[in-house]
Image (cartoon, helix red, strand yellow):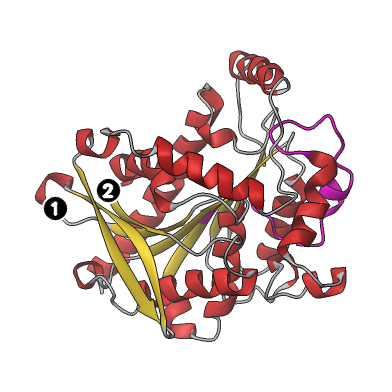
Amino acid sequence: MTLALDRATLDEARRFNRTLAWLPRFRINNRVMPLALQSLLRLSQLAPDRTLARAGIRPQQVIAHADGLRVPVRVLRPLCGGRPPRAVVLDYHGGGWAIGNAQMNDRLNADLIAACDVAVVSVDYRLATSAPLSAIIDDCVAAARWLLQGGLAEYAGLPVYLLGESAGGHLAAATLLRLKAWPALLAQIDGAILYYGVYDLAGTPSVRAADAHTVVLHGPGMQASLRLLTPGMTDAQRRAGALSPLYGDLHGFPPAILFAGERDPLRDDTTLLAAAWRAVADVECHLVPEAPHGFIRFPIRMAGQVRGRVHGWLNARIAVMLTKSVST
């Protein structure tokens, strides 16, 4: 499925892509560069950002605990005019598994809260600079289990949705696979929202074919980055379902909405996962024209329209859940 974008929106995206073509491409080819980028991110967050205050959202740092792990999460609690939120979104940030934190998603999450009357729990999982991928997934699963088992008592019983962007999309899908070990918990998740995730750690065809003409991501270095994330493994081991959701057993998965950009080397990851997911649940998948990796963060109309489609999808899901709750 492709979003219906008008000519002006597409022309704006093309102009923005020409600007991006002059900028360095993101790649991870050592462990020093992510540490430097993470330091810059934290420095940028020292300056006051009044986005949440203006939106009437109270952030709170909480420790999620499950499976012997203690995982920091950032809880964004909407005021909702004194009403409780209608649902909870469990958010996994992106950043190539090696940079990023929950706070970097505040603006996107504030937009989601305002449009859908939800609370957001964003996970500050360990990063690849200090932990192996298996431990990162453990953190994400522990945060999900804590939330689904009533870790936030005031939100117990509300429908839960998983959201992930880029590496966070991978972690959200990997979390769903691990939650199959607890069917009652998995059944509490009413949907997933995934933006341009990585679902084959050995590289889908579009990753393997990526060249120097990509924008945002460094096409020729993508496979090397995935190998750095999974040292000592063969491609067959990287494609084990526990690490690469594209090869996992998706039975029991909830409905989902997925997005990929036509100009993103990771586009096959999303389209192939969506095709497999449709065999077990309702899936809406959009391949967005002229969109590169990370496009929902760009100051262009396309980004707003995609976020608006997510808000519409989420509101429709919540409305169905609330109707079921009233009828029972």
What secondary structure predominates along the stretch shown in magenta? Answer: loop
Tell me which residue sits at (52%, 54%) in the image: 164
Q: What crowding class fits label 1: few (fewer than 14 Cα within 10 Å), some (14-19), or many (20 or more)?
A: few
Evaluate whether residue 92 shows in this view: yes
Secondary structure type for disc 2: loop
Q: Amino acid at mark 1?
A: Arg
Q: Which of the labelled discs sits on residue 83, or is there none?
A: 1
Whole-percent x and y of residue 120?
34, 55
Towards the viewer: 102 or 152: 102
Picture quadrant where residue 2 is located? top right
Q: Residue 236: within the magenta?
A: no
Q: Which of the labelled discs sits on residue 117, or is there none?
A: 2
Whole-percent x and y of residue 51?
29, 34
The image quadrant where one finds the N terminus is top right
Q: Which residues are magenta?
A: 193-218
Secondary structure type for disc 1: loop
Q: Amino acid at mark 2?
A: Asp
Q: What crowding class fits label 2: few (fewer than 14 Cα within 10 Å), some (14-19), or many (20 or more)?
A: many
Tell me which residue sits at (65%, 50%) in the image: 32
Whole-percent x and y of residue 221?
81, 45
